[in-house]
Amino acid sequence: MKSRNFILIAAIVGAALFFVARFGALSYGEYVFFAGYTVLQYVVLATAWNMLGGYTGYVNFGSAAFFAVGAYTSVFFHKLYPLPIPVLVVAAAVVAGLCGLGMGYLTLRLRGAFFSIATLALAVVLQTLVVNWDFVGGARGAYVIRPANVDMNWLGETVSGFIAHNLISNYLQYLFLIMLILAIGAIATARAIERSMLGFGFAAIRDDELAAEASGVPTLKLKLIATALSGAFMGMAGAPFPYYISFLQPSSAFGLEYAVNSIAMPIIGGTATWVGPLVGAILLGTLQQVATVTISSAVNVLLVGLLLVFFVIVAPNGLVGVMQKLFRGKPGAQT
Amino acid sequence: MSFDLLVNALIAGVLLGGFYAAVTVGISISFGILDIVNIAHPAFVILGSYIAYILNARFGLDPVLVGILVLPAFYALGAAVYQVYYVSFEKRGKEALSGLAFFFGLLFITEVLLILVFGVDYRYVQVAYIDANFGKFLGTTALPKIIAELPMRMLVPCVMSIVMFIVLLLFIKRTFIGRAIMAVSQDALALQLQGASPVRIKRIAFAISIATAAMAGAFLIIIQPVEPSVGREYIGRVFAICVLGGMGSLTGTLIGAMLLGVAESLTATFYGPSWAPAVSFGLLLLTLAFRPSGIMGR
């Protein structure tokens, strides 16, 4: 399937999803959008993590840091001058992508473990920075008041009028729609990478970096592209977050659940293709929404941790790998 | 910048560094020597702290004594973890991605279990010497002021940690198994040809590395009250020290720990304690950028 057709189909599925959510909201209330936003956010995070972790084999423990960079970029601009969210998403992508690039440049020339450790420490340091930075709220946190109306005037009067009357009835739905578009964008990008020279280069790095380097694959350059792309998408996922939660404090932006989920979801789903993170994010994300409501959020993280350990030991190719084995009788692509 | 303040910060830094050395020595063995990226190590340290807390609250035992008493249990735990790691990842040659994810999962499972059992309240131990300083503890007034004012809460962990270091160094340099541990990091095949099983040696070494977490945990809860997520602050620190000191060098680890302790203490004194966590990361990045082999690196 060509990429253009894929995006078309994904867009149709996305549109259908949005209208299903709107109908669901009629009987279950706005919680459908509230929970749906979180699941979609995990789809973006998991897909973004997989662009680096799944395709090149470099483990990023600092997803929460990149996510928070996106969120705090939004807060920063919100305090300076209120910009429409799509612009904030682009700004967050640039800042988080640059963070990824810088981190990668310093650590990716060394053994893989150093990169992972550095990302782990990055979260702590960025949190320290934010806690000490009063302009974005510091340790106290920052209030980000949602605008009363969706500001779409930059799209022109006809389009914004059409959207306001026919598509979106409140701000939460607007945020949901943005996250939906981001998720489709992330998945389409991941799929395009898999089928391009870039993807083959990534796979070569994952399978045997030394051999790849010796065969003329520009490994450092490719790894930097992967880190920047992955970081940028994580930042994008974080950009609308302050508006979603309306009170952002460092401990929620750098939350435990982002770091562990964005690793657990691709690994549980399967890291070889774009399907894995999507499946993992939808399953785990929904499961957690249910568990948070019915049990508690601590049990939630425990559940994810246990599933993660279970899957890496028992089914390292994830659910997708298990399915492939069941239906085709042969093992899935190597992780 | 007053001179007294500087001297005090330096002393506090050295004492802190001694404690950091105890937390890091386990990583030095697992990551530095065995090449196992055990990011769950700080979680085991916190587990050690909680065991010290329970036994202290229930029986009034001294935390350091508890640390020594539970060494065998932590050794067994370490051996079990290594066995799972070996069978699931090292044998299959998948330690890079899956192994890292495995330890990451362990980190969270340990932390969340502690939260579920004990809650997120800070826990502390009650020992007579914690609030005293060195002069008061000895009951003399003859000591110079600077020595008499050393807080026991920092001094005990630092001294005990250095004792632990000396024991470990002697073990590694003088015994057959200790030398075999160093050998397995250099050439596992050659070790096999000498008649020692690399897997067994690695299991012993990893078990020792987890056993040191019991001691480090006991020290930690003497120094400060502990809650389950405190461990995460140490992930950056321990790896920074390990890399700064030079992979696989225990002496380097001690030096690196002292350096980080002093750097953090100076930062906390002159810029404010909220900046201290960033120091380790800065040091880690600088080391990786300019001298990836560390101070004592080969």
Image (cartoon, coloured by chain):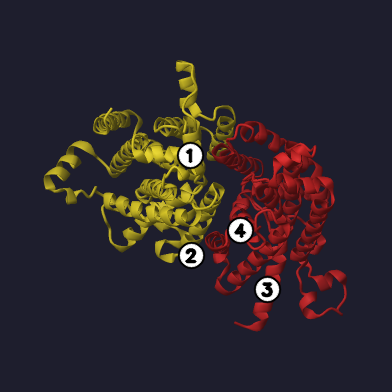
Chain colours: A yellow, B red
| Labelled disc at residue A132 | 2
According to the picture, the residue beneath numbered tag 1 turns out to be: A206
Given the image, on which type of amino acid does mark 1 rest?
Arg
Q: Tell me, yes or no, whether the two marked residues, 1 and 3, touch with CB atoms within 8 Å.
A: no
**Residue A314 appears at what percent x and percent y?**
58, 27
Q: Secondary structure at mark 4?
A: loop
Looking at the image, residue B264 lies above or below residue B211:
below
State which tag comes first along the sequence, 4 or 3. 3
Query: Could you say which quadrant of the image residue B286 lies in?
Result: bottom right
Residue A127 visible at all: yes
Given residues A83 and B277, the one toward you in this image is B277
Image quarter where the N terminus of chain B lies is bottom right
Depth check, mark 2 against mark 4: the one in front is: 4
Q: Tell me, yes or no, whether the two marked residues, 3 and 2, touch with CB atoms within 8 Å.
A: no
Given the image, on which type of amino acid does mark 3 rest?
Leu
Residue that lies at the very extreme toward the front in this rendered image:
A215
Given the image, on which type of amino acid does mark 4 rest?
Ser
